[in-house]
Amino acid sequence: MLFLDLDKFKQVNDSLGHAFGGKLLQSVVGRLLACVRASDTVCRLGGDEFVILLSEIKEAGNAGLKAGQILTAINAPFEIDSHKIYITASIGVATYPGDSADAESLIKNADLAMYQAKEQGRNSYRFETVTAN
């Protein structure tokens, strides 16, 4: 599972407006869908957060490769309403059953990993490294 959050998306909404932000989110979804297989699932949780379920990934390293491909796709400039805009994303990666045994914990752990990516400079991905208590 990948948990993706767009970096500094609030600044886009504040400077260019919510309508522009909505168009940007639609464009992001298009790029996300282009990066995954038909068997994968892309969900918008709300705001600028997305969960991507990679259903047929057998090795954690392959999830990292997919996260890298998604970052490359997001980093390409978006052209919306005569604006060229560059954005980045931070992605957390958690795997089943290695990192979590249920969906709720998997999302939570991927979210924590995403925050680690943000804290370490953004525009990157991190694997879940939290140990369960």
Image (cartoon, rainbow, N blue to C red):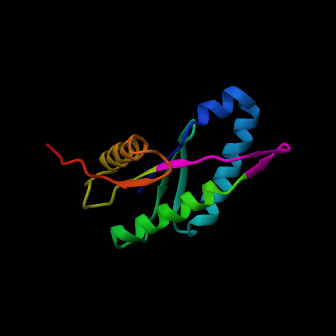
Q: Extreme front residue here?
A: 121
Question: Height in image: 61 above or below 44?
Answer: below
Does residue 81 appear to the left or right of 6 in the view shown? right
Does residue 89 appear to the left or right of 61 in the view shown? right
Name the residue at 36% across, 73% down: 58
Let me know if residue 25 is in the magenta part.
no
Question: Height in image: 90 above or below 98?
Answer: above
Question: Can the viewer see residue 93?
Answer: no
**Quadrant of residue 54 within the rendered picture:** bottom left
Q: Extreme left residue here?
A: 133
Does residue 5 appear to the left or right of 62 in the view shown? right
Name the residue at 37% across, 49% down: 110
Residue 101 place in picture, x, y as percent: 25, 54
Residue 100 place in picture, x, y as percent: 26, 53
Viewer-proximal residue among 54 and 122? 122
Overall secondary structure of the magenta section: strand
